[in-house]
Image (spheres, helix red, strand yellow):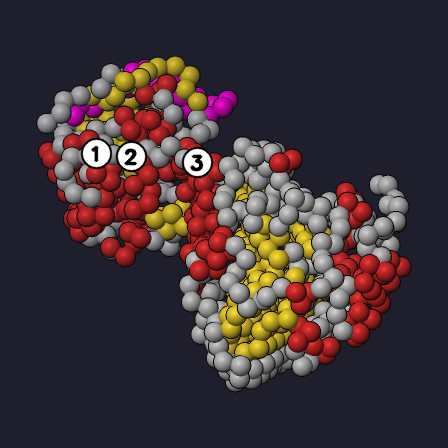
Amino acid sequence: MRERLFTLSTFTPETAAALPGPPWLRHRRTAAAEAFASAPLPTEKDEVWRYSRIDSLDLDRYQTPVSPDLTATDVHGPPPSDRIRALVDGLGPRAGLIVTVNGVLATVASEAGDDALAIGRMTEHDEAEALLGSIATDPTDFVLLNDAFAADPVVIDVHAGVTIEHPVVVVHVITGAGGDAVFPRTVIRGASSSVASVVEIVVDVEGGLLAELPTRGASSVANHAEHLVVPVTEVQVADGAELNYVSIQSLGPATWQLAHQVSTIGADAGLHSFAVALGGSYARLRTDSALIGTSGTSKLRAAYIGRDDQMLDFRTLQDHRAPKTTSDLLFMGAVADRSHSVYSGLIRVRRGAVRSDAMQTNHNLVLDEGAHADSVPNLDIEENDVRCSHASTVGPVSEDQRYYLESRGVEPEVAERLIVAGFFADIADQVPIAGTRAMIGQALADRTGVHGV
Amino acid sequence: MSTGELKIEDLHAGIPGREILRGVTLTVRSGEVHAVMGPNGSGKSTLAHVLMGRPGYEILSGTVTLDGIDLLSLPTWQRARAGLFLGMQHPIEVPGVSLVTALTASRPEIEAGEVGANAGAGDVSERMRAEAKRIGFDERFLTRSLNVDLSGGERKRNETLQMGVLRPRFAVLDEIDSGLDVDALAAVGRRVEEATEEWGLGVLAITHFRRLLKVLKPDVVHVLSAGRVVATGESELAEIVDRTGYAAYIGAGP
C-alpha cells in the first residue's frame, strides 16, 4: 500500500481561522485544523479504515464553499427550494425545521414555544461554547476536520421535562456543480425527562435519491456533482429522557460522505436511532453510542441498499459504561451490481457496567455476483455479569424461497424483488418516527425494485 | 368442465450423479384423482419436484406434458402459469412476504379475478377469505409472512388455500396429509375433492398412508418403488398396500 503524501492546500489552519464566528469558535477551529494537520491521514492499513476506500480520498480536490458573511441570509423565510419544501412537507407535521445549504443555515422555523425548544444557529445559543463538542469529546481525523471547518453548526435543544409530539426536521442540502466540501454539524440535546424526535436528512438536491430516483446505470457517475460531505451529529439524551432520531442519507452517486453520529445516553434514558443509507459513491457512517447512566437504553437500527459501484461503510460502537444498560443493534443491508458494503461493529462493556445486555445483529443480502458484503462483529467485554450476543449473515437470495414463489407462478425477477422487500419489511416497521416510516419504506421499495418490474 | 391431461412418459430423472426416477409413466386426466404411494426413497418427492422444476434436479430422459404443453422445457413459474400446482411437503418460509402479496404477484390477471376457471369469482382477498373458511385456516395468517411461525398442519392448509385461489389445471400434492389432525385432514381432503368437480382439477396425490385416501377418494392408485411405477390399480390397491406393506412391490417390475 502506498504512503500518502500529506499536503493540504485547502484545509489549512489559516483557512479554518478565516471562517466567520465568535472568537471562541474561531480559536476552536484553528486548534482543530492544527491537530488535523499534525496527525497522519488515515489509511486503509488502520484497523478502523480496513475495507474502506480512504486511500483514494484526495482532499485537495475539494474546497469550502462558504462565504464569509453568514448573517447575510434571511433564515426566517421559506425553505430554499420547492423540492426541499416538498420533501419536508412529506414528513407530516413537525415541531421545527432547520435547513442548511452547503453547511450554512438557510431556514429555521420553530412551531413549538421557546420554553419547550430552542433550535437554530449554534452561535446564538447561550451555552454554545459548552455544547459544541460536548459529546464528540475526543475528536480524531474527520471529526477534527468538521471541528475545524463546520461553518455554521446548528442546535436542537429540547428543554427538561418537555414532551414534543412532532419531530424537528433538519435538512442539510448539498448543492452546486461539484468540488465542494461541506461540514454539517448538528448538536441535539434532550434535557432530562424530555421526549422528542429528530429527523436529519442529508440530501443532494440535484442528484439525491429522495428527490428523483435515478434509474440504475442510466446515469453515469460522471454526470453527477462530486462533493465531499463530512457531517457530525452529537446527541445527548439526558437522564430520564427519550429521543427518537432518524437519519436519511440521500446523496448523489458521485459524492463522498464521512459521517459520524455520536451519542451519550443517561440514566433511565432511551435513544432509538434509525439510519437509512441510500446514496453516495463512498458513504461511511460511524455510529458511537455510549451508555453512561444506569439503566440507559440504546436501540440502533440501519437499513442500506447499495448498487452500481457504490460502497456503503458502517462502523459502530456500543459502549456500555454504566450498570444495567441495554444496547440493541440491528443493521440490515443489500448490495447489488458491483456495490460493496462493510459492517464492522464493536460491543464494549467496561468494568463496572454489570448486568448489561448488548445485542448486535447484521444481515446482508448479496444480490449479484459482483457485489460484496463484509460483516465483522466484535466484542470487548471487561465485566463478567453481562449478556452479549452477536449474529451476522451474508448471503444471496435464498434459492428455496425463490423456488417457492416461482412455483406459485411468480416471475423470477418479481420473486427476487418480493424477497428483498420482505427482507427489509420487519426493520422498516421499526422506524421510530411515523412521518418518516412511509418515506423510508418507499425509498427502500424503490431501491429494491431495481431488479424487478 | 375442462378435459385435458397431465401426461408423464418414461421419465428418468434425479440429482447429479444419481438416477432416482427410472422410467415413470402415468397419465392424470382432468377431474381424476391419482394417488402415488410408495416406501421412503422410492422417488415420490423427487417426482413432485421434477414436475415443478426445482433447482438441483436434472432430467435424463422422458417427457411431461400438460394439455399438450411440454412442461419440462419451461421454467418453474411458467409451469405454474400453464396450470400446474405443487402443494409442497415442506412449504418454505418467506419472511416479509404475505400470502396476498405472493398470490397477487403470481398472475398478472389474478387481481381482476380472471384466473383460469375462476373468472368472476371475486378479488384475491375475498377469495382467500372464502377458501380459508372452507378449510378452517385462520384468517389472521393471510397477511402474515408466508409460512413463518406456522405449524406443519397450518402450512398444509395454506398450500390447499393457495390451490383453491389459483385454481390450477392439475395439482401435485406432496404429502398434503402430513401434520394434519383428523378434522383438518377431512377439510383439506374435501376441498380437493370438491375442486375436481368445481373446475375439473386433476390431482396427483403423493402419500405414505392410506388415511388421506379415505377422505380423498382416488380413481387410480400407483405404487412407486425404486423409481418405477410397479403397480397400478383402483382404490382397493391402497387397501392392499395398507394391509400387506410395500415389501411385495420392492424389486418388482410393471
Q: Which residue is mark 3?
A: A452
Q: Are marks 3 and 1 on the same chain?
A: no
Residue A391 visible to the viewer? no
Q: What element does badge 2 sit on?
A: loop
In the rendered image, residue B224, in percent from the top left (x then y), is placed at: 30, 26
Disc 1 residue type (three-letter): Val
Q: Are marks 3 and 1 in contact (CB under 8 Å)?
A: no
Q: What element does badge 1 sit on?
A: loop
Bounds of the magenta span? B8-30
3 vs 1, front mark: 3
Task: Using a 10 Å C-alpha cutoff, classify the residue at mark 1 as few (fewer than 14 neighbours), some (14 to 19) or many (20 or more).
Answer: some
Q: Residue at x 68, y 53 (%)?
A: A229
Q: Residue at x 21, y 34 (%)?
A: B115
Task: Using a 10 Å C-alpha cutoff, classify the residue at mark 3 as few (fewer than 14 neighbours), some (14 to 19) or many (20 or more).
Answer: few
Q: Residue at x 75, y 48 (%)?
A: A62
- Say if the magenta span includes residue B13: yes
Task: Using a 10 Å C-alpha cutoff, classify the residue at mark 2 as few (fewer than 14 neighbours), some (14 to 19) or many (20 or more).
Answer: some
Indicate the quadrant where residue A281 lies. top right
Q: Does A416 sit left or right of B124 as displayed?
A: right
Residue toward you, A327 or A147: A147
Q: Are marks 1 and 2 in contact (CB under 8 Å)?
A: yes
Q: Which residue is mark 2?
A: B107
Q: Are marks 3 and 2 on the same chain?
A: no
Q: Earlier in the sequence, mark 1 or mark 2?
A: 2
